[in-house]
Amino acid sequence: MSSLDFVEITSRGEIPFVAMGHVNVQEVVAAEPPRGARLRVFSHRLPGQPSVSFSLACVFISIVRHMASPDSEVRNYLTHSDCDIARGKHLLFFRAKAGGTERVEPMAVCNWSDVGSLWGDSFDRALWIAVEGPHRDVLKLLDSIREQEQDCTPVSAEASPPAADDAHQAAIDFRNKLLAKNWPDGKRVAEIAGSGSASNPHQYATRLRSNGALLGVWVAAERTYRHPDFQFDAHGTIRPDVASLLKVLPSNGEDPNGWRRAFWLYSPHAMLDGETPAAVFARAPQQVVEVAKREFCEDPSAHW
């Protein structure tokens, strides 16, 4: 395989920093080791599989929460493996069942080059966890993750990991957060552009969406499309590079309601230093286009 979806958590001061995205295995193997601690959860992307979804990201993050718990397998391994610290072993691998956190197992591999020989059909549905950095720093990162969880949400001792319903609710909450930005509907897009007919003011935006020049997200409660704000400049004019970006993102046929693309655009991305594609697009549109090409236009026939 050559493609991995991932969620990454690192330290930025006292606060854990989360990013998610998609990389090639070759990029992971060749990357410089982190200066501090880093936790990364990877899944094998099958040919034709879409980009990492928001619900899958929730599964990844739930595993990291499990790793940060006081009695987790990862924490116990780090605490009691003094011999590894003495040898300077700063890269550990663990494995978890996809979709669950009931068991995280240490793997008998020491570097990324060993992973390829172990990755086979029996591991296709597993999530791989890379723990990088000095053990003491990793334990501090796990502590900071746990502290953030306690500060944000009271959790009882018997609380279980997030279920599928929690991931679905998280996606709904994220969608509602984006809609709170009050993105313009088709009528407003036409008014700003000075186009559209009095009898059908949404026709102008409908034509732009059909031609791949404008992204819209369907809002069922309003029975209309809203149009993400990253596409417009300060005067409300559609940015000229929007069409180039939409050409490499999933098509209207693949993403008929637009939300898959919106979630990707407004989620932190590792290739953009943790910024969202939507934020970077305003100042560096071609950079976002190139990241989208690498993520959505990769040759699925490539292998290790």
Image: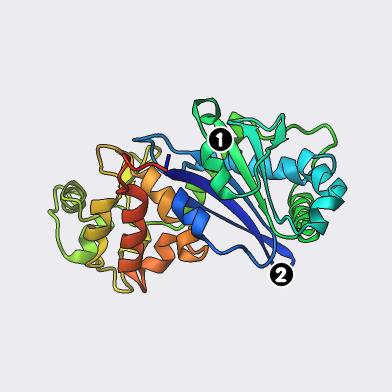
Which residue is at the front of the view, 239 or 129?
129
**What residue did someone put label 1 on?**
118
Q: Residue at x 80, y 56 (%)?
A: 85
Q: Secondary structure at mark 2?
A: loop
Specify how the rendered protein is coloured: rainbow
In terms of sequence position, does the residue under pointer 2 or pointer 1 come before the other?
A: 2
* Marks 2 and 1, how far apart at CA: 35 Å
Is 206 situated left or right of 60 in this image? left
Decide: is 53 above or below 271. above
Q: Please tell me which residue lies in front, 215 or 12.
A: 12
The residue that appears at 83% across and 37% down in the rendered structure is: 156
As drawn, 190 above or below 258: below
Q: From the top left corner, tell me how far across and down residue 298 is, in percent.
A: 32, 48
Mark linked to residue 13: 2
Q: Quadrant of the N terminus?
A: top left
Reply above or below: 37 against 284.
above
Residue 10 locus on image (x, y percent): 65, 60
Residue 132 appears left or right of 159: left
